[in-house]
Amino acid sequence: MSTNYKSYKPFVSPYDPCEPILEKTYSTPPHLYLGFQPPNLPQFSPLEALKKGTLWQPLYDPYYSPYERARE
């Protein structure tokens, strides 16, 4: 499986009045990396699945605020 966070380096114009952002990151959902759902995927317990929003562990992708540092 690939990582859920990708990054790229945008074009930096010499005429831009703002301070340049040298690297931008974005999140991709984990279901993009699964073709068909494989059999016998590991599952969360029912209570934990309600808290996390999915029953299957490989499909869990926690949301981090852009202002919070993403834990890896």
Image (cartoon, rainbow, N blue to C red):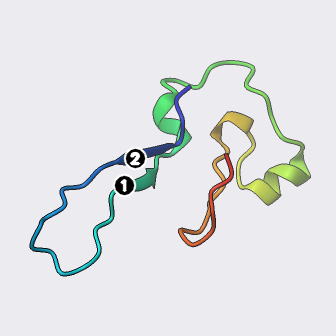
Left or right: 31 as drawn, with respect to 56: left
Query: In the image shown, does 54 or 3 lie closer to the viewer?
Result: 3
From the top left corner, tell me how far across and down residue 70 is, in percent.
63, 56
Outermost left residue: 15
Report the Cα–Cα distance between label 1 and label 2.
Answer: 7 Å
From the top left corner, tell me how far across and down residue 54 is, in percent.
71, 48
Left or right: 69 as drawn, with respect to 36: right
From the top left corner, tell me how far across and down residue 8 is, in percent.
33, 47
Amino acid marked by disc 1? Glu
Q: Secondary structure at mark 2?
A: strand
* Residue 23: mark in rendering: 1
Query: In the image shown, does 64 or 22 lie closer to the viewer?
Result: 22
Q: Does 7 sit above or below residue 50?
A: above
From the top left corner, tell me how far across and down residue 7 is, in percent.
40, 47
Query: In the image shown, does 52 or 64 lie closer to the viewer?
Result: 64
| Residue that mark 2 sits on | 7
Residue at 78% x, 28% y is: 42
* Badge nearest the viewer, 1 or 2: 1
Residue 63 appears in which quarter of the rendering? Answer: bottom right
Q: Are marks 1 and 2 in contact (CB under 8 Å)?
A: yes
Left or right: 66 as drawn, with respect to 46: left
Amino acid marked by disc 2? Ser
Left or right: 10 as drawn, with respect to 52: left
